[in-house]
Image (spheres, rainbow, N blue to C red):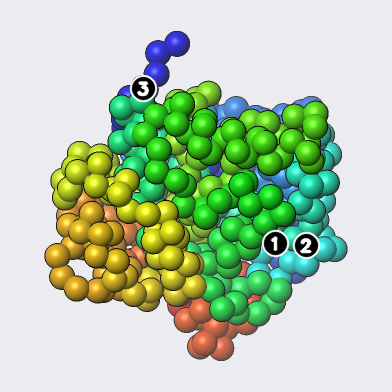
Amino acid sequence: MSRLGLFEGVGVEIEYMIVDGESLDVRPVCDELMEIMAGEPVSDLERGSIAWSNELVLHVLELKTNGPAADLHGLASAFHAEVVTAIEKLESMGCTLLPGGVHPWMDPSLETRLWPHEYNEVYQAFDRIFDCSGHGWSNLQSTHVNLPFDGDEEFGQLHAAIRIVLPLIPALAAASPFLDGAPRPSLDARLEAYRLNARRIPEVAGAVIPEPVSSEQEYRDRILQPLYDALEPHDPEGVLRHEWANARGAIARFERGAIEIRVIDAQECPTADLAVVGLVCGVVRALTEERWGSVANMDDIETERLASVLDDTIRAGGDAVVSDRMLLDAFGWTRSETTAITVWRSLADRVAPDLVPDEYGAAIETIVGHGPLASRMLGAHRQGGSLETIAGGLVDSLRADRLFIA
């Protein structure tokens, strides 16, 4: 089977919460929605360029490119058309869609409902081992990006580039400042919970930043086999013995010939999602092209150092101070320490003009100019906006495909 090479395609997946149309509390009705759409019970539904599918819990709907797209042109419009269709169907059920990285007041200990249909044995295994009735499992919505590679050389280049972009992504994409009905110490509460959700078996997520590896065999030896060995006493049937059980912030999907980036919070509307995706992909591409330094030098940056930067951006978003000289050098930043959002502004200026579709330019300017969605949500809260009002504003942003501004 032929494989796509570097940047010959892209796959995007965006998760949305299904909520009550009035209270905006979560509603576990994804299976009902899918059955209404398909005319029969299904877990996947193909609708042209965009497909629908279920996730771990019944209140989450995932929209995704139906296979790899050639590029990002027009994807926001395609996603938004499906969002509108889903909202229209949900309104007949008294529900709607809520975007963002987490539900701001969901109580997962009381409201978690696992998907009970096809693939349920996998979800049950995760629940038995890790207890999925927590924020890091049942209350988190992300935007995943799949970038292709063909062979070990391209894999090594792509993995090295993605690995050093990951720590900066929350500064651009944090969209989860509230949990349990209150502001959290971290702007990216989704990632804060996510990186601890498998702490019973540390090999599952590692340091979230993946270890430096340059080939498929090295990846299997260094990351996947230790993970499988650690899972075996808890999963003797091998239900979870698959590469998708790896919960690092970027994981190799050798079955599909891609690396999947998992640290992007779902944004307020498809244009915002695709703007973030476009800028991240543009920077990854520039790094693989060695615009500012060699790929080999990227893998010289220790995982612990990158994880420390990720800790800072999870907590402070764009205001996080970045002072790691090796990391800044990798992005062609020659001055002293700076904030993470300042790095993104510089990268947007250098990368967006030739590597990101023009249709996402205005959204990128808003994000790097006003900060990630989490900062804008907190700004609205400081101005007196209740969580319910802010959530309602996100619902409106999603329906109109419009960025949220405090």
Q: Nearer the viewer, residue 398 or 259?
A: 259
Q: Earlier in the sequence, mark 2 or mark 3?
A: 2
Left or right, 197 with respect to 299, comes to right
Q: Work out whether residue 159 can be spotted.
A: yes
Left or right, 373 with respect to 238, comes to left
Q: Name the secondary structure under disc 2.
A: helix
Label disc, if present, on residue 135 of the rendered structure: 1
Q: Position of residue 396 (x, y in %)?
A: 55, 64
- For discs 1 and 3, the disc positioned in front in the rendered view: 3
In space, the residues marked 2 and 1 are separated at their CA atoms by 6 Å
Left or right, 257 with respect to 92, comes to left
Q: Earlier in the sequence, mark 2 or mark 1?
A: 2
Q: Earlier in the sequence, mark 1 or mark 3?
A: 1
Label disc, if present, on residue 151 of the rendered structure: 3
For disc 2, the marked residue is 108
Q: Residue at x 46, y 52 (%)?
A: 209
Label disc, if present, on residue 50 of the rendered structure: none
Q: Quadrant of residue 329?
A: bottom left
Q: Residue at x 52, y 87 (%)?
A: 382
Q: Nearer the viewer, residue 399 or 103?
A: 103
Q: Name the secondary structure under disc 1.
A: helix
Kindly indicate whether the residue at mark 1 contacts the one at mark 2 (C-beta within 8 angstroms): yes
Q: Nearer the viewer, residue 36 or 326?
A: 326
Q: Residue at x 69, y 50 (%)?
A: 201
Give the amino acid at mark 3. Answer: Gly
Q: Name the secondary structure under disc 3.
A: loop
Q: Position of residue 68 (x, y in %)?
A: 44, 29
